[in-house]
Image (cartoon, rainbow, N blue to C red):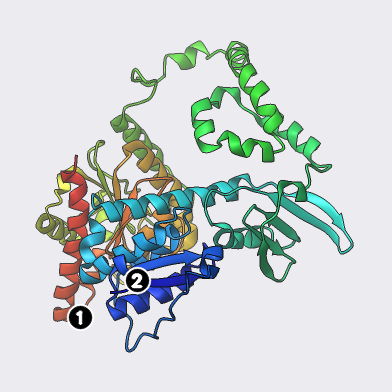
Amino acid sequence: MNARRVALDGPADVAGWRASARALLAEGVPPSAVIWTTGAESHDLFAASEALPPVAGPPPSVPRAFLGLAETALLHSDPERFGLLYRLLTRVAADRWVLQDMADPDVARSNALAKAVRRDKHKMTAFVRFREMTTEDGACFVAWFEPEHHIVEATAPFFVRRFAAMRWSILTPERSAHWNGGDLVFGDGASRADAPDGDALETVWRAYYASIFNPARLKVAAMRAEMPKKYWRNLPEASLIRPLIAQAARATADMVAAAPLPEKRASRQMPRTDAGLLPPEGVLEALRAEAAGCRACPLWGPATQTVFGEGPADARVMVVGEQPGDKEDVAGRPFVGPAGALFDRAAKEAGLERRKVYVTNAVKHFKFEPRGKFRLHKTPGPTEIAACRSWLERETMALKPRLIVAMGATAARAVMGRVVKIGESRGAVLKRDDGPDVLVTVHPSYLLRMPDEDRQRTEYARFVDDLRLAALSLRDP
């Protein structure tokens, strides 16, 4: 078969790649017969591209997890990314379980590209600094940034949401973004000289930064890992970083000398490990005791008690449900009601041993509506989820699990910090840079409420399949 040359509009033309890949896949074109070109390459006299026919009939079915992975990984600067993702697409279309094999070279490479892109997008949101300029139309704020990958168009909407009321531009060597208060437009790249070097507010900002700098919490290696030196020259506070680091040790000693620990309190300190921290089981016990008096939201009033998580402190898998039910509220233990019994049965079929996992809930108090002698479950709202999220985060920090299984929309929202559609995210392990991997699935109570027995059996089998993915985290070294 002759080589098929596909010309994309630019290095970040994800939509163009998707349309072309869909047509190539429908036509049965193998990855080895496709040459992908972008930008100037697309206009090479010897690189004439061939128009692809429209896809006849429904497009090939692939998991949503692949689409999310591809949309992120395709923004990487790796010149082989388009061919890599098309090759993986052809394999996933033939066997959707390919994505679950993290040792597969194509899957591992694609996830590595996506992780690098997510990290670059995080750097952009963290290290862009706007400087004020005066124009004929009034004040405008301009920033300079040098991304490693093609992320400008994908990341610019974050700044629209954050700085919707001001006019701004973000200049980069490859692409620039401009917001006039109503429209977001993109243009060609710029040079560092096109951006201002400073403004009147930077002196105030540096004074504030120096005043809040806490030498006792300084971790130089962690700081440099999170904020590489290449970004320092764009930050107003960059000139302060070296002297503040140099003074940190002396400042810490002065702080300790100025505020010694009172003798009465010293005798009440809890036992500490060689690393200077409580062991995980000690942290969990302390959290459980502290949560017993939680009054962060009104749910504590009608509930019987706080229902905290339980399980081994070295658990690799952390299972998060929605909230305690009627039986859990009375017993003071999670997952002991009908939904918990169904979870136990499914986990056993999946090879996920309950005694090896830590189980907890997104919300620690039972939310219900009295109905005669019964207490009917009510779904927790955003306020209650937010009020309890600190407990879930502290449990996660103490456990350091490899995987979190979020069962149901409430649990997924609490874990991910945003609204999650179960149907779109289910069936794949979601990789995160800032925490454990996440597996989203349904809540067992969803299965119990199904009136159709055939559908209930089907969904129960899917639930077991989801838990089998979690069981892999226990078996893998």
Front-lying residue, 308 or 8: 8
Q: Quadrant of the C terminus?
A: top left
How busy is the neighbourhood of tag 2: few (under 14 within 10 Å), some, or many (20 plus)? few
Q: Look at 33% across and 57% down and name the residue there.
A: 323
Instruction: Name the amino acid, label 2.
Output: Ala
Instruction: Name the amino acid, label 1.
Output: Pro
Determine which residue is flagged by label 1: 451
**477 to the left or right of 424:** left
Q: Which element is circle 1 on?
A: loop
Q: Quadrant of residue 452?
A: bottom left
Q: Is residue 367 visible?
A: no
Residue situated furthest front in the rendering: 46
Residue 329: x and y, percent?
29, 54
Residue 261: x and y, percent?
52, 14
Determine which residue is flagged by label 2: 3
Residue 32: x and y, percent?
30, 65
